[in-house]
Image: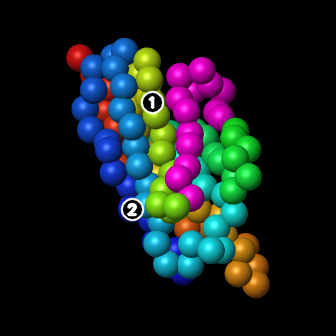
Amino acid sequence: QVQLVESGGGLVQPGGSLRLSCVASGSVFSIYAMGWYRQAPGKQRELVATITNGGSTKYGDSVKGRFTISRDNAKNTVYLQMNSLKPEDTAVYYCKADSFQSGIYYYWGQGIQVTVSS
C-alpha cells in the first residue's frame, strides 16, 4: 500500500505561482513513477505531468513551458512548480503513484484545490 498526501494548494492571482508537494509513504520502494492530474468542475480528469524514477518527464499540452515536475527520492516527495497560472488552471489537483508489487497498482491522493482568480 502507498499513501499520498498533497499540500501547497490555494488561491492565487492570474500570472502568479504555486508549488504543490506530494509525500508518499508506505511501500514507497514499489513506486516507479509519480505524477499530477487535475479535474475541473464538469470536466474529465486530465494529465498535468508525470516523472519516472529515472527522471523522465511528460507534460500535458496545456501546461508545457509553465509547469515543472520534480522529485526528491530521499524525501519520497514529488513537486509541481506552477508558474504563469491562468484561470483555466483552476481545478482539484491529484497526486498519483504507479507501483509494482506482483502487479501494477495505482494510488491517488485525496486531491487539493487550486484556484486562479483575481
**Tag shown at residue 5:** 2
User: Is disc 1 placed on a helix, strand or loop?
Assistant: strand
Q: Residue at x 56, y 78 (%)?
A: 27
- Percent coordinates x, y for residue 65 in the rendering: 60, 21
Q: Residue at x 56, y 39 (%)?
A: 69
In the picture, measured across the screen, residue 13 lies left or right of residue 100, that is left
- Check disc 1 and give the amino acid type: Met
User: Is disc 2 placed on a helix, strand or loop?
Assistant: strand
- Check disc 2 and give the amino acid type: Val
Magenta residue span: 59-73
**Tag shown at residue 55:** none
Q: Quadrant of residue 92?
A: top left
Q: Nearer the viewer, residue 4 or 87?
A: 4
Q: Is residue 72 magenta?
A: yes
The residue that mark 1 highlights is: 82
- Whether residue 78 is visible here, answered yes or no, is yes
- Percent coordinates x, y for residue 23 in the rendering: 43, 60
Q: In which quadrant will I find the C terminus?
A: top left
Q: Residue at x 65, y 48 (%)?
A: 51
Residue that sits furthest to the bottom in the current view: 102
Q: Quadrant of residue 42?
A: top left
Mark 1 surroundings: few (<14), some (14-19) or many (≥20) residues within 10 A: many
- Percent coordinates x, y for residue 38 in the rendering: 49, 43
